[in-house]
Image: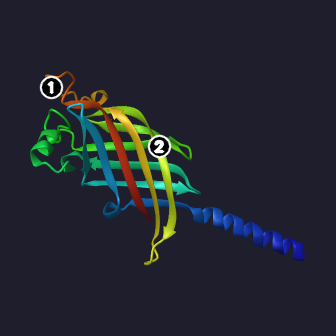
């Protein structure tokens, strides 16, 4: 009888702890950065970010079960107003006609996430590296998790084709865009 009781208690604890580790998180915009880097004039790198975005993800024992996010293209910010206006124009994001960039995860391992990225109405499969930060309880009792997604895309794959040749050879804007998305989420 005593043995059955111990087995029942242990089974309950194991089931309870495995259920407790699964959680859905809402992206915390105050502690998240959605950024990118691209070559300029073949000699330097321009960095930018988006100021308006949202997303949710389902995390179970450090593995992603789902993730989806939306970015407002008009919120692009490189620190230079004239450049940001150009990026919002039809030459690049065409924010007036394509107000959002979206990403939906299709699969994930501990170190890689695959998903569908849509920019300017064009959807392509992308693979991102995952650097998992962990899960903690903050001083106010909220459960938070954090991680970084990195990868690169060809901007031309999404119809962002604008460019100009430079005299010394090469082009003004590089094709490869490096993505750096630093996410902190709050369990919902």
> For numbered disc 2, what is the local secondary structure?
strand
> For numbered disc 1, what is the local secondary structure?
loop
Q: Residues within 10 Å of mark 1 (few under 14, many from 20)?
A: few
Label placed on residue 180: none
Q: How many marks?
A: 2
**Residue 32, visible in the rendered structure:** yes
Q: CA distance from mark 2 to mark 1?
A: 31 Å
Q: Position of residue 54 (x, y in %)?
A: 32, 55
Could you tell me which residue is drawn at 37 percent across and 49 percent down? 181
Label placed on residue 164: 1
Quadrant placement of the C terminus: bottom left
Horizontal side, residue 145 vs residue 37: left or right: right
Most foreground residue, 87 or 10? 87
Residue bearing the label numbered 2:
129
Q: Position of residue 103 (x, y in %)?
A: 37, 43
**Marked residue nearer the N-terminal end (2 or 1):** 2
Horizontal side, residue 66 vs residue 6: left or right: left
**Residue 22 vertical placement versus 159 (above, below):** below
Q: Residues within 10 Å of mark 2 (few under 14, many from 20)?
A: some
**Residue 96, visible in the rendered structure:** no
Most foreground residue, 91 or 175? 175
Could you tell me which residue is drawn at 61 percent across and 63 percent down? 19
Q: Position of residue 84 (x, y in %)?
A: 15, 45
Q: Position of residue 109 (x, y in %)?
A: 56, 44
* Residue 29 quadrant: bottom left
Between circles 2 and 1, the one closer to the viewer is: 1
Could you tell me which residue is drawn at 82 percent across and 69 percent down? 7
Most foreground residue, 177 or 21? 177
Residue found at the very far right of the displayed protein: 1
What is the image's colouring?
A: rainbow
**Residue 60 vertical placement versus 42 (above, below):** below
């Amino acid at each position: 009888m005593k043995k059955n009781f111990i087995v029942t208690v242990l089974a309950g604890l194991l089931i309870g702890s495995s259920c407790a580790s699964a959680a859905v998180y809402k992206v915390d915009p105050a502690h998240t950065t959605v950024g990118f880097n691209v070559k300029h004039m073949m000699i330097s790198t321009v960095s930018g970010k988006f100021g308006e975005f949202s997303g949710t993800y389902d995390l179970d024992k450090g593995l992603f079960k789902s993730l989806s996010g939306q970015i407002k293209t008009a919120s692009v910010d490189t620190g230079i107003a004239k450049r940001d206006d150009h990026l919002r124009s039809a030459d690049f994001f065409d924010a007036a006609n394509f107000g959002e960039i979206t990403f939906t995860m299709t699969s994930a391992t501990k170190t890689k996430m695959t998903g569908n990225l849509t920019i300017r109405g064009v959807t392509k499969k992308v693979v991102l590296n995952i650097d998992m930060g962990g899960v903690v309880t903050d001083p106010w009792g909220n459960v938070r998790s954090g991680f970084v997604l990195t990868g690169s895309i060809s901007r031309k794959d999404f119809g962002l084709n604008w460019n100009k040749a430079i005299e010394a050879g090469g082009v003004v804007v590089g094709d490869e865009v490096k993505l750096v998305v630093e996410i902190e989420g709050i369990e919902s």
